[in-house]
Image (cartoon, coloured by chain):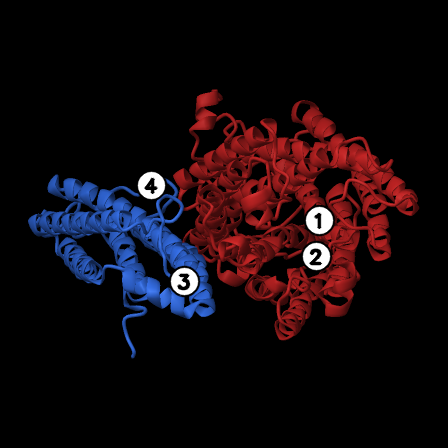
Amino acid sequence: MTTATVTGKPDEPVVATRNYLTEGGVTLRSWLLTRDHKRIAILYTLSITFFFFVGGAAATLIRLNLVTPPGIFTPDIYNRLFTLHGVIMVWFFLIPSIPNTMGNFLIPLMIGAKDLAFPRLNLLSWYLYVGAGLLALFAILIGGVDTGWTFYTPFSSLYSNGYVVLALAAVLAVGFSSILTGLNFIVTTHRMRAPGMTWYRLPVFVWSNYATSVIMVLATPVLAITLILVAAERLLKVGIFDPALGGDPLLFQHLFWFYSHPAVYIMILPGFGVISEIVPCFARKPLFGYRFVVWSSIAISIIGFFVWAHHMFVAGISLYAGLVFSLLSYVIAVPSAIKVFNWTATLHKGWISFDAPMLYALGFIGLFTIGGLTGLFVANLAFDVHVTDTYFVVAHFHYIMVGGMVSAYFGGLHYWWPKVTGRLYPEWWARIAALLIFFGFNLTFFPQFILGYLGMERRYYSYPPEFQAWNILSSAGASVLAAGYALPFFYLGWSLFRGKRAGSNPWAATGLEWQTSSPPPTHNFDRTPTVTRPPYQYRPEPEPQDV
Amino acid sequence: MSEAGPLPRPEPQYATAGQQAEAAAFGMWVFLATEILFFGGLLLAYTWLRASHPEGVAEAGRHTKVVIGSVNTLVLLTSSLTMALAVHAAEQGRRKALTRLLAVTALLGLLFLGLKGYEYHGEWTEHLVPGLNFHEDSPHARTIELFYFLYFLLTGIHGIHVTIGIGLIAWLALRARHGAFSARHYTPVEVTGLYWHFVDVVWIFLYPLIYLVGRSGP
């Protein structure tokens, strides 16, 4: 265990009647005005789940349309569907997913703090998120946007007939929400650690969210100003992105990807953190090469700022720029690979059990590896010219974002579910869902690698008949995937009321968050814990369950 | 307030008031890092424009009102001095001096905004406002329009920052007058000071890029 003693005063009862869910009242008002990081995490989880299903519904319609070319939707509606899917999934699910739910809930618990450094800012961040989400939904309901999530100029600034400015405003607002979260996490990690919680005793989950926060704080403002420029160009018909107005569309792409490529790491680094918690716990071994894992996160967050133009190999950048960005994109694969090797080495000779969180984690390692290796394919100049804007790229980033990040999200959700709710989820159902998601995911997206290699372009509502067999496979996989994603909604909901009581530490895990009761009290620890040992002190045999 | 006042009770998530003060200052530094990148995007756009159309940008630069710009630079730099003196007064627990210096800082900020508004008015009458009334006969008209597009965005966003700063400083002055700060507790003054100096530093970059370009050389 990481700490000496952190349980409540000895004369207090062990039953967690005094917890954040009931302390401070159960009224709606007490939730909507809460400053407790754990309650805000719950608010985020509910809203993010909602947007996940909105984005998922759009994906379902896209896959439905692609079963039978030329499909059931008009091209115009199809364009709005994939834009909706992209905008919602990127900004309203993936970016806030792990940081704002588990990060919010766990970072103070993991470092032995009572709350984040700025609780009011944390609540403001959620309100910004919800306001932005409602604005985005409003833009969709009154007609939608057809630019794709990338808002490329001059289409977005001049020709598009969708509600582009509204959508830009929504993304701008959600961007500020993520800046505030990042700022809060950085200050909290620096200033709120318990005595003895040195940097090298921090769980990798905290390190990963720290690295993510650095990107949020430094990249998001560039997106903000870029969106303002696009909106101004669209409203005033003056601007620097549209060649007809004297501007340069490449400038837009540079600015956009200066945010959006680092944002890809916002969408995966927290997943690395979750996996680094789950793998040692279910292999009963310390994380192999802790410092390498830590520094590879930091390296990714730094190098991630210098690879953006690999999205623009065919956009007209110079060959030399292309060479440099290609090389740097190879370089950033190194720290990512270090993590995969270290998780694998952690498994080596471990005492492995296959509970649902571990199934998700193992799925993550495999899928992320495929996504990462195909990332090297598209970092290669010559190959990228062949597959730019094809389904190969779509499959590549879905392996990272969905196979990686969503798997990590579900893994983390199951792993910390007992801590958050005080209840155990039904293990059998959870394993079925994990397997369904893994197989459904591969069936959906592996055919897309082949389609892309054969030359099927992304973002078209129709395709030549020879691609139909692969598309039918992909859509069949999507329905398995949808079933896999729907299942947890039911059995986790059931467990809230009927699940077995979890106790404070059902996994016999190390880490401060497991030392306090489940669900934790509002101020997390009755006495501030003192940390004396490094994290992940697991031994290769099952430890007796917490009594 | 000449004597060291009572130490305020920290918010519940902090162990000590000192930890709270450190977190607040550090939070402001992180926020300013965000701000640098925010203005950085616009400055990149400016750099691109100037690199691709140097002559047009130089001509546009000669349209700017260098006297007002220079006076405003002086005004803003002076306000940074009074802000620094205000923080110093707060450190020493001199309540009257703190209140006055904050008030002077806010007034200098207002003067800056007033001069800026006068300058905008001049640009409006000279038909230099892109998208609304821009008219220019030069062969570089398009570049001049883009220059003024960026000019209004840069100075407009900077102006919003100045306005927020004035509001914060005026509020601090009111609280200082009622003795809210002491030599042991003046974090809000210190943190707002950081913000105000940042707004100043942004202007130091904007001034040469806007007013001095095209005014040197043969």
Which disc, if any, is residue A326?
A: none
Q: Which residue is mark 2?
A: A539
Q: Residues within 10 Å of mark 1 (few under 14, many from 20)?
A: few
Chain A colour as displayed: red
For residue A316, what is the image quadrant?
A: bottom right
Q: Are marks 1 and 2 in contact (CB under 8 Å)?
A: yes
On the rendered structure, is A369 left or right of A265? right
Are discs 4 and 2 located on one and the same chain? Answer: no
Q: Position of residue A103 (x, y in %)?
A: 55, 45
Q: Which residue is mark 3?
A: B139
- Residue drawn 49% across and 57% down? A246
Are discs 4 and 1 located on one and the same chain? Answer: no
Residue type, numbered disc 1: Glu
Residue type, numbered disc 4: Glu
Chain B colour as displayed: blue
Q: Position of residue A422 (x, y in %)?
A: 61, 32
